[in-house]
């Protein structure tokens, strides 16, 4: 690795740490400031935040496995998801979440289904579905990722 590469990585991490320390003070004031920026940030930045929370290791594993199967033409799928999810958050979800005054998905479900057993059932089903889909994506793709990486090592 060249010295310039190391410098770029170190500068990047220093900037990220400084930004984190700066925003830590403002987000530690209340739960509202942590989840919604104390409602002082514009709706489109809230949309970017909501879109960013949808990215995880499952998506990365899925992208690598679909790249393995389809090759470079798989990037058409990535561009579709990379534009659809942020567009949805910017067009609908961010404004609606701000108007409904909820901060988490659990609060959103409670608002939609009420505080009773329907809400508890919906939250439980949502959690189970999320865990099963994440486990399924990772479990299905791991053999293909390992086979792909074995050619590089």
Image: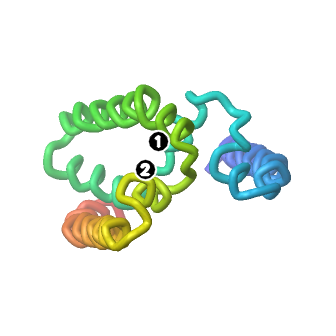
Residue topped by disc 2: 54
Q: Nearer the viewer, residue 63 or 124?
A: 124
Mark 1 surroundings within 10 Å by alpha-carbon count, few (fewer than 14), some (14 through 19), many (20 or more): some
At numbered mark 1, what does the secondary structure look like: helix, strand or loop?
Answer: helix
Q: Residue at x 35, y 58 (%)?
A: 113
The residue lying toward the viewer, choosing from 116 and 51, is: 116
Asked whether residue 26 appears in the rendered view, the answer is: yes
What residue is shown at x 76% (from left), y 57% (from top)? 30
In contact (CB < 8 Å): disc 2 and disc 1 = yes
Look at the picture and state if 67 lies above or below 93. Answer: below
Of 62 and 54, the residue lying toward us: 54
Report x, y in % for residue 91: 42, 26
Instruction: Answer yes or no: is residue 14 visible.
Output: no
- Give the alpha-carbon distance from disc 2 to disc 1, as whole Å: 5 Å
In the rendered structure, find residue 88 and report the number of the disc placed on it: none
Q: Where is residue 140 in the image (x, y as percent from the top left)?
A: 19, 68
Quadrant of the rendering where the C terminus is positioned? bottom left
Viewed as shown, does residue 141 lie left or right of 55?
Answer: left
**What's the image's color scheme?**
rainbow
Q: Is residue 98 left or right of residue 88?
A: right
Quarter of the figure with residue 29: bottom right
Label 2: how many Cα within 10 Å (few below 14, some 14–19, many 20+): few
**In the structure shown, which secondary structural element does the residue marked by tag 2 occupy?**
loop
Disc 1 target residue: 51
Where residue 71 appears, x then y in whole percent?
19, 42
> Residue 76 occupies which quadrant of the picture?
top left
* Residue at x 57% of width, y 52% of height: 103
What residue is shown at x 27% (from left), y 31% (from top)? Answer: 80
Can you tell which quarter of the image residue 45 is in?
A: top right
Q: Is residue 17 left or right of residue 56?
A: right
């Amino acid at each position: 690795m060249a010295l310039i590469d190391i410098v770029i990585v170190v500068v990047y991490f220093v900037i990220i740490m400084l930004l984190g320390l700066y925003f830590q003070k403002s987000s530690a004031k209340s739960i509202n400031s942590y989840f919604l920026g104390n409602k002082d940030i514009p709706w489109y930045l809230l949309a970017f935040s909501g879109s960013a929370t949808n990215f995880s290791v499952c998506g990365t594993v899925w992208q690598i496995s679909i790249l393995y199967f389809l090759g470079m033409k798989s990037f058409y799928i990535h561009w579709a998801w990379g534009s659809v999810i942020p567009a949805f958050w910017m067009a609908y979800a961010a404004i609606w979440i701000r108007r409904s005054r909820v901060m988490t998905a659990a609060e959103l479900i409670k608002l939609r289904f009420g505080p009773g057993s329907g809400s508890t059932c919906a939250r439980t089903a949502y959690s189970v579905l999320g865990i099963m889909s994440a486990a399924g994506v990772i479990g299905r793709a791991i053999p293909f990722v390992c086979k792909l990486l074995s050619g590089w090592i």
